[in-house]
Image: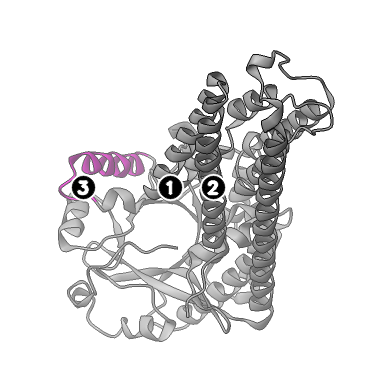
Amino acid sequence: MAHASWDESHSRRVHAMTRLEAILLMGFGGLWCVALLMVDRPLLAGINLALAIFGACLLVLLRRGRLRLATILAVHVAPFAMASCLFDNPPLGVPKATVLFFLPIAAGSYFAFRRDNLYLRIVLPALYLLAFIAFSLLPLAISDPALIVPAEAAHVAAWVNTVSALAALVFTLGLMHADLTDRRGWEYDLGRAIARGEFRLAYQPQVDRIGRLVGAEALLRWHSPRRGNVPPGQFIPLAEETGQIVAIGDWVLRAACAQLARWNTQPATAHLTLSVNISVAQFLQPDFVPNVTDIVTRSGCDVSHLKLELTESMLVENMPDMAERMQALCDIGLVWALDDLGAGYSSLQALGQFPFAQIKLDQSFVRGLPADESSLRIVEAMISLADTLSLTSVAEGVETEEQFRCLMEAGCEAFQGYLFGRPMDIDSFDALIAPAPDAMAGSADGGGTPHER
């Protein structure tokens, strides 16, 4: 049985929380609208009608799969909530209850956007908590009898709002607890996977313009005894967030260097290169350069055949010592490649500041070839850029012969994708070396969806 990743489980809980808020808004907004019209409070009825309509809009967005937009709108219900609090001026002996809704909204905002920007994660929940304190302790309420809830309805409203707000808060805290428990489970399993050696490398072939095998990209795979085969997209984000990606990245580099050293000793594979992805957290480690140098040296591999790949988004940070670290490893013969060119936002000036020897075209552009004229022009421009900067170009996600021919005509030098082979274990990869080089492209498995790392 497949296990959902922590991110997927978190999204389902956020969906449940947002759906509950939408239902509460629709239900209570509609009922109070009718009740307030019966006691001749049209302004209050209008506010509650607006809440009901707002809740209905949230449900429509959720049904259309717009979870993020629905959740952002849900946590910005403050204008309606504050308006309701202003009209919540009960008689003596009856507590204010509408203000209690600020608590589940604050908790829900923090829970839903736990990895988002500072405003959604911290500022917005803090504002709701401040509003809760202000409306609870200060006389912030309208005193005009014609604009407040009648005394006979105030007792009912206090009970209903108190029970509803506390139920929503308990529900939200329950989701947060389940989310935390699930996260701890994933963290524990990741740590155990590192200790027990549950990770494996898969190798995706890279070929040149004549279909000759010239190298591979090492891709991480995890087979968990409890969770089965876990795709990288399910555990890599959590590993990056918790810092476990550093230990995992070191293992990948050691395993890749060991495999490259074995290839170096065999005439049929001595020419092969091997590419390894480097995470931001791994690159930022103070001992990154000496650690990589030590791993490469101990493995005995030909360092000039090892390529370390950085994603384009890392260039946006433009860290002062980034080029210096890269150059230090270039000095020992290591090769740097820029991964997923076109997917990030690096400037040409920034690209020229770093000692890259290779760029990899993002598969989102390759996917549209040759029919998509816009993708074709972008690919041609990026290959021309590589030529101008004296960089080799590699196209990822090549799945069809038409894409292959189109990329060759554009001047691309190397290729990677399902047309030439899916990520495979080392035994399957070694089996590719035996056939004649020109037979490789014809026997490769085409079709499928682009590989997710």
- Is residue 353 in view from this perspective? no
- Is residue 147 in view from this perspective? yes
- Which residue is drawn at the image coordinates 76% and 32% (left, top)? 96
Pick whichever of labels 2 and 3 is earlier in the sequence.
Answer: 2
Which residue type carries mark 2? Thr
Q: Secondary structure at mark 3?
A: helix
- Asked whether, in this view, residue 153 is left or right of residue 96, the answer is left
Give the number of the disc on residue 18. Answer: 2
- Which residue is drawn at the image coordinates 33% and 54% (left, top)? 363
Residue 197 is drawn in which quadrant? Answer: bottom right
Give the number of the disc on residue 62. Answer: 1
Magenta part mainly helix, strand or loop? helix
Residue 103 is drawn in which quadrant? Answer: top right
- From the image, tell me which residue sits under label 3: 410
- Which residue is drawn at the image coordinates 67% and 32% (left, top)? 153
Circle 2 or circle 3, nearest the eye: 2
Q: Which residues are magenta?
A: 368-388
Mark 2–mark 1 Cα distance, whole angstroms, equals: 8 Å
Circle 1 or circle 3, nearest the eye: 1
- Residue 128 is covered by the magenta coloring: no
- Asked whether, in this view, residue 123 is left or right of residue 275, the answer is right
Task: Tell whether label 1 touches label 2 (CB within 8 Å).
Answer: yes
Task: Tell whether label 3 touches label 2 (CB within 8 Å).
Answer: no
Q: Nearer the viewer, residue 119 or 355?
A: 119
Q: Nearer the viewer, residue 128 or 392?
A: 128
Q: Secondary structure at mark 2?
A: helix
- The percent position of residue 4, horizontal first and vertical second, equals 51, 68
Pick whichever of labels 2 and 1 is earlier in the sequence.
Answer: 2
Task: Tell whether label 3 touches label 1 (CB within 8 Å).
Answer: no
